Image (cartoon, rainbow, N blue to C red):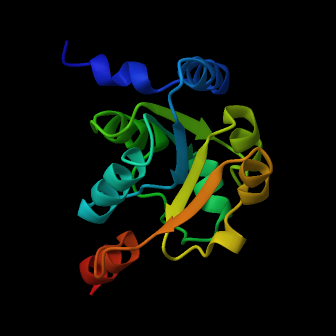
Amino acid sequence: MEQDHRRKIVDWNRAAAAAAAARAAGRRVVFTNGCFDLLHAGHVRYLAQARDLGDMLVVGLNSDDSVRSLGKGEDRPLVPEAQRAEVLAALAAVDRVVIFDQPTPRELIETIAPDVLVKGGDWPVERIVGAEVVQAAGGRVLSLPLVPGLSTSELLRRIRS
């Protein structure tokens, strides 16, 4: 029973099938993505807000290689992808976690075909990868406000100083 949350970590095909089944049942699918390295209260609040926008939240998680390709620093990610996925899956707000290796989640967004695409406030809607795909299908794209002072980069700055 204690490992049930790990069933939420799925491959692309299972995530797409779950999203399609949810939509067929009249439920709204929300998608977001990120590295989620050093999960903190800002992430938890953001994911809860994202989930409140629909009935199912799918989180695209950057793989370790994908995080490294983003130039976040030589020591990133701090937490390996399998562990990051497990922590995300343990959150009540998250229904599915899908790891992606690509530099952006565009292909995954096309595969999941969410009704709502969400990113944090540091991403204006016009810069959100996959926005045009979701909007063309009649979906919504939103940039949710960040919680001031809560970020992985800020945590790392404080740890390193």
Q: Is residue 57 above or below residue 147?
A: above
Residue 132 in sight in this render:
yes
Compared with 144, 158 (above or below) is below
Q: Is residue 5 left or right of residue 119?
A: left
> What is the tally of numbered marks visible in this picture?
0
Along the viewing direction, whichever of 81 and 142 lies nearer the viewer = 142
Horizontal and vertical percent for residue 96? 46, 31
Q: Position of residue 93 (x, y in %)?
A: 32, 40
Picture coordinates of residue 130, whole percent (x, y): 73, 54
In which image quadrant can residue 8 be found? top left
* Residue 60 shows up from this direction: no
**Frontmost residue, 161 versus 32:** 32
In the rendered image, the quadrant that contains the N terminus is: top left
Q: Residue furthest top?
A: 1
Instruction: Please report the residue visible at 54 percent of the width from the left and 69 percent of the height from the top.
Output: 74
Q: Is residue 9 left or right of residue 103?
A: left
Q: Residue at x 54, y 56 (%)?
A: 118
User: Residue at 35% of width from left, 55% of height from top?
Assistant: 49
In the picture, residue 83 is in which quadrant? top left
Q: Is residue 155 left or right of residue 103?
A: left
Q: Which of the pair 64/59 is nearer the observer?
A: 59
Q: Is residue 11 above or below residue 134?
A: above
Q: Quadrant of the C terminus?
A: bottom left
Q: Is residue 155 above or below residue 85?
A: below
Q: Position of residue 82 (x, y in %)?
A: 44, 36
Residue at figure coordinates x 29%, y 17% from the top left: 4
Question: In this view, which residue lies farthest toward the bottom?
Answer: 161
